[in-house]
Amino acid sequence: MENTIKVIVFQLHNEQYGVNIQQVRSIEKLQNVTPVPGTADFIKGVINLRGDITPIIDLKDRLQIGKTEYTDHTRVLIINIESIQMGLIVDNATDVLDIEESIIDAPPEVIGGVTEEYLSGVAKIDDRLLILLDIERILNFQELNEVEKAAAKQL
């Protein structure tokens, strides 16, 4: 049997993205975000998620492809990077898919306005292209520290 990975599919603009389901702890509706002064623009603030202060990042803003318009479909993907819990704001979380590793191609230099440094590959599924994000690369070390400090300011 061929190796497959399970991905959560979400939308940014009209593009479909996927992240490995093992990197996502939960999918939440967007709740009130408390701004934290003195942080990067893409850090929208923090939320109290079941007792945990969780920094919230606008993924479109982080990838420099615009700002998210909040709607009833807006979701927050709760992830962990190096033991730091944070939320990524996405337009919509739509699906969970099993993808055969053989259909995943190396990422092009730029796709959907996103540079390859954030991508782990692209997969053609039926008539659509799924852009696979590498969550571990979304923030660099300095930005991870800033996110951690944003959470600590609210404690």
Image: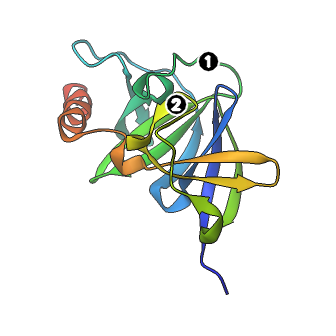
Residue 8: tell me if it is visible.
yes
Q: Which residue does the numbered mark 2 point to in the structure image? A: 89
Residue at image location 67% in from the left, 87% down from the top: 1
Q: Secondary structure at mark 2?
A: strand
Relative to 101, say whether 154 is above or below. above
Mark 2 or 1, nearer chain start: 1
Foreground: 33 or 90?
90
Q: Position of residue 96 (x, y in %)?
A: 69, 56
* Quadrant (top left/top right/bottom left/bottom right) for the C terminus: top left
Marks 2 and 1 sit apart, C-alpha to C-alpha, by 9 Å
The part of the image, by quadrant, that contains residue 111 is top right
Q: Of the numbered discs in the image, which one, if any, rests on residue 122?
A: none
User: Which residue appears farthest toward the bottom when viewing the image?
Assistant: 1
Which residue reaches farthest front?
109
Amino acid on which disc 1 is placed:
Tyr
| Residue depicted at x 44% and y 28% | 63
Whole-percent x and y of residue 105? 57, 58
Residue 70, which numbered label?
1
Identity of the amino acid at label 2? Answer: Ile
* Vertical position of residue 134 compared to residue 54: above or below: below
**Nearest the camera: 110 or 78?**
110
Q: Position of residue 40 (x, y in %)?
A: 28, 19
Q: Is residue 1 left or right of residue 151?
A: right
Viewed as shown, does residue 105 lie left or right of 126?
Answer: left
Q: Secondary structure at mark 1?
A: loop
Q: For residue 51, say whether it is visible.
A: no
Residue at 26%, 32% in the rendered image: 147
**Local crowd size for mark 1, using a 10 Å CA cut-off: few (<14), some (14–19), many (≥20):** few
Quarter of the figure with residue 70: top right
Q: Which residue is rendered at x = 43% and y = 41% of the image?
A: 116
Q: Are marks 2 and 1 in contact (CB under 8 Å)?
A: yes
- Image quadrant assignment for residue 93: top right
